[in-house]
Every structure is written in structure tokens, then in C-alpha cells.
Amino acid sequence: MAKRPSARNKATQRREDGLWDSPRALNMIADAILLLASGAIGYALVILFTRMPVLPLQAITLTHAPANLSSAQIEDAARRAVTGSFLTTDIERARTVFEGLPWVRHATVRRVWPGSLEIELEEHVAVARWWAPENAPARMVNAQGELFLADHQNALPLFVGPDESAATMLSRHLEWSDLLAPTGRQIQKMVLSRREAWQLVLDDGTRLELGREDDKQPITGRLARYVNTQPEVMRRGVQKLIYADLRYPNGYAIRMSSTEHQDKP
């Protein structure tokens, strides 16, 4: 009668028929090792290739000539921005360097095969000066209502107000300039106080006190009333209007040059 194999013999047999006796398992291990080795070699080749003096940077080109930057400023930025070859130059760092230039709102840097960088600069379009205390850097307001550092252009209107109000002031300037157009006058200075009270100084020196916004008596309506009554006010006297207080609900007070006369049309 044949003897059954003992449990000890079965365990010994399983060990003998383990991983190294399985062709399928060995093939899987070999494939994994080959894959890892290929990846490591590929990575090493990429690093070696990018560090070799191949594909040197041949040129840096601008899509258009900046209106407010000198050649010296552009060249200095290019030297600081480019620190490697065509492949190793850090595009994001280069963009940051160019955006640090005065008057540059946004910069785009891209590689152009086989060996150049193309730089596109979006410049600020100044629409107003921004008041700054003495010894503080000069700032201006761009067409998007953003503040940026730049020397003042005295021909532009002056805005005085909290920094966070720049966009609001630009919007009001555009709206009220259109409203004042029939008078032939332009806004030379616009002031917004911390209490949100508005004041305008026109290009002939006339000061308009607009006060705070009111849902029942909005500033736009009060200013429109002033514009519509100006022809009649001017016919009443030969003296120059120097001040108008538009904070009244049903009219406005005026002051003429060299007189204490006031009127409420």
C-alpha cells in the first residue's frame, strides 16, 4: 500500500517549485528591470543633452518696439533674463524679469526653433496721474484702472483718492467727462475723500463740489442739471464762475470771481 506524502514533504516541494522555478514570474521581473533601466538611461541622456553646449541661444527678438522703454533697458533685462542655452533658459524667470520693467503690464516669452526667444510686451496705457505724497514713487493709472509705477505726464488728469478706488475713479472720469462735453470743459483733477465725497476741478479752474453718492439724488443727475443750466448762468453775468456746490437737492450754489454773489438756479 502506497504511503501518502507527509505535510513536511509537501512544504518542501512548494519551496522547490517557488519563484525561481516560474518562467512567467522571471519574465515579469526581467521586464520590470529593463523598463526601470531604460527610464533611468533616458533621464540621464536628457539631463546630459540639456547641459551640453548644444543649441545655443542665437537671438532674442521683440514682436514690436516698446513706446516707453529704451534700448538700454531692454538689453539689461535680456542679460538678466537669459541664463542658459535655447533649451535651458527658464522661460518663467525671463517673463518675470521683463514684467519688472517700467511701463510693462504683461510679458510673454516663448521659444522659437531652432535657437531664439520671442518676447511680446504689453505696455501700460496711461490715462491719468495718481497723487503721491512727497518723496513717494510716482504712479499712474492705466486704461484698466490699475496703478503702476511711472513718471508723471502732466498733460493727464490727476486722481486723488484711496489706492483701491483707482478703477472706480477711472469709470467716473469717463462718465462725467462725457456729461461735461457740452460745456467745452475737461476734468483736470478728480478727488475722492475717505468719506466717499467727490470733487472735480475743471481745466479752467472751476471747482465742482459733488458730495457723496445718493440714491435719491445721484451725482450724475446733479451734474447733468449743472451742465443744462450753464448757458443761462453765463448769460446772467460777465464774471467767471469759479465754484459750484452741487450737493443741494433742488439746485446748486455758485461763486463768481471777485464777488461774494451766490445763486441757486
Image (cartoon, helix red, strand yellow):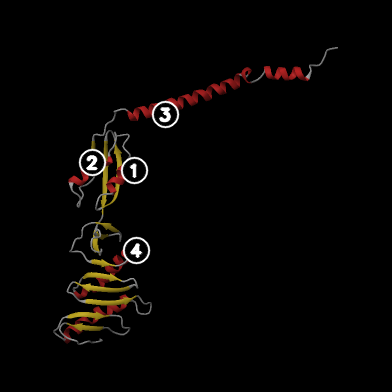
Residue type at the position of mark 2: Thr
Instruction: Give the alpha-carbon distance from disc 2 to disc 1, as whole Å.
Output: 17 Å
- Mark number displayed over residue 128: none
First in sequence: mark 1 vs mark 3 = 3
- The kind of residue on which mark 3 rests is Tyr
Residue sitting at the far left: 238
Label 4 is placed on what type of residue? Glu
- Marks 2 and 3 in Cβ contact (< 8 Å): no
Which is nearer the eye, 148 or 63? 148
Q: For the C terminus, which image quadrant? A: bottom left
Tell me, yes or no, whether the two marked residues, 1 and 4, touch with CB atoms within 8 Å.
no
Q: CA distance from mark 1 to mark 4?
A: 29 Å
Measure the C-alpha gap from mark 4 to mark 3: 49 Å
The numbered mark, 1 or 4, whose residue comes first in the sequence reads 1
Percent of width and height locating residue 103: 24, 53
The mark nearer the N terminus, 2 or 1, is: 2
Instruction: Name the disc covering residue 61, or none.
Output: 2
Q: Residues within 10 Å of mark 2 (few under 14, many from 20)?
A: few
Q: Residues within 10 Å of mark 4 (few under 14, many from 20)?
A: few
The residue beneath circle 1 is: 92
The picture places residue 71, in percent across and down from the top left corner, at 18, 45
- For image coordinates 23% across by 66% down, the residue present is 158
Q: Are marks 4 and 3 in contact (CB under 8 Å)?
A: no
Residue receiving disc 3: 43
Q: Residue at x 33, y 39 (%)?
A: 90
Q: Which x, y percent locates residue 8?
A: 76, 19
Q: CA distance from mark 1 to mark 3?
A: 23 Å
- Which residue is denoted by mark 4 in the rendering? 164
